[in-house]
Image (spheres, rainbow, N blue to C red):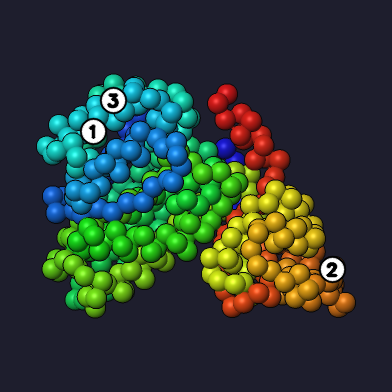
Amino acid sequence: MKLSPLAPASFPDLPAIDGVRLATAAAGIKYPGRADVMLAVFDKATTVAGVFTRSRCPSAPVDWCKAVLGGGRARALLVNSGNANAFTGKRGREATKISAALVADAIGCRKREVFLASTGVIGEPLDPSKFEGVVGAAAARAEPDAWLDAARAIMTTDTYPKGATHRVTVGDAAVTINGIAKGAGMIAPDMATMLAFVVTDAAIDAPVLQAMLDRGVRDSFNAITVDGDTSTSDTLLVFATGAAGETPISDSGDRRFRPLRAALDDLLRDLAHQVVRDGEGARKFVEVRVTGAASKRSARRIAMAIANSPLVKTAIAGEDANWGRIVMAVGKAGEPADRDKLAIWFGETRVAVRGERDRHYSEAEAAAHMRRREIVITVDVGAGKGRDTVWTCDLTKDYVAINGDYRS
């Protein structure tokens, strides 16, 4: 698949993190000869937090993870690409049990300490016997610096592997946070349609880590959209090995909590933006800013109405500064907005003000901004002080081609 023009220049150098080892394998689930399984093995002290799709048709691995998350501990993560194990009924549920048992036997832990994620085609049964020949060997050869291989193994229609890393001082400890993600289509918030896995060597109790993650997704993975469609398989898991050595953070009032939370927020936003930059067929990365809304929640709804509009997104693909489509999207959002105070900018060019076209509007300046790969649309709706920002991409013919051929 052709590399996205919005792709970063290279995959970042993700350092080894004490307490986690990674391996990949080719199980032949869908892609012959390609690594399609990723296994992460964690030390015993590892805590875990997670957020998942809000789809009412979740995959079997999502149900499994939700059921075992309450234990707060993780020893392994098994991920496969090519098959989502979603809408697979009893066979899907049995596949998760068998898969977890295989991993538990291979590394010597309880099944409830094994987390699972699957991505790919919906409705096709996943044959768990595919894992039998690869899990044991993968566990034996797992190593701490195989992040790039891991990121590649979880890809489906992605055009590049996605990774990010941050280092932060937490108390007296130097802490590392690494993350990988996959996602290109069926991307819309409701936690965000993709898989993402984050590991840190910080020591933090599971309930505090969960609270940190819940907050972190609000303005990262819950603030992106590619096509407005929420997946059955959304899974974001954060693992904390505790190997950095300090006593665990057990309360959000701990002075070490805020710097760790800020670093996690930055990493989640980085990964979320990479998902948008790899939107299926995307050629433009778009930031939508809404100000003057009744509340932040209202601003978010208006911003998403703009970001999810096929008419807005195709205009962006055509490099057309069609501000009338922005007006349409604001109006359909169902949120408080004052038509006669509405103002719209493309980049630094104000195209509309006080509910009509700006008399000083320059078509040439607006068109020049639309030709850029990174576009900013700002809308003030004149209804209050609420503001919010979301990120999306354009909608091109390639998106139709990719999804028209997805199962072929």
SS at mark 3 in the image: helix
What amino acid does circle 3 point to?
A: Glu
Compared to residue 325, the image places residue 108 above or below, namely above
The residue that label 2 is drawn on is 364
The residue that label 1 is drawn on is 100
Marks 1 and 2 sit apart, C-alpha to C-alpha, by 59 Å
Q: Quadrant of the C terminus?
A: top right
On screen, residue 313 versus residue 33, left or right, reads right
Q: Which mark is residue 175?
A: none
Q: Quadrant of the N terminus?
A: top right
Count of number-bearing discs = 3
Mark found first going from the N terminus, 2 or 3 = 3
Spot occupied by residue 209 in the image (x, y as percentages of width and height): 27, 61
Q: Report the residue at 22% width, 75% height from top.
A: 254
Q: Can residue 3 be seen here?
A: no
Judge by depth and name the residue closer to the eye, 307 or 184.
307
Q: Report the residue at 30% width, 69% height from top.
A: 260
Mark found first going from the N terminus, 1 or 2 = 1
What amino acid does circle 2 point to?
A: Ala
Compared to residue 220, the image places residue 89 above or below, namely above
Q: Report the residue at 19% width, 40% height from top.
A: 112
Spot occupied by residue 117 in the image (x, y as percentages of width and height): 35, 39
Spot occupied by residue 194 in the image (x, y as percentages of width and height): 45, 46
Mark found first going from the N terminus, 1 or 3 = 3
Marks 2 and 3 sit apart, C-alpha to C-alpha, by 60 Å
What amino acid does circle 1 point to?
A: Ala
Q: Depth-wise, is mark 2 or mark 3 nearer the camera?
A: 3
The residue that label 3 is drawn on is 94
On screen, residue 332 versus residue 81, left or right, reads right
Compared to residue 259, the image places residue 211 above or below, namely above
Q: Dot 2, crowdedness within 10 Å: few (<14), some or many (≥20)?
A: few
Q: Depth-wise, is mark 1 or mark 3 nearer the camera?
A: 3
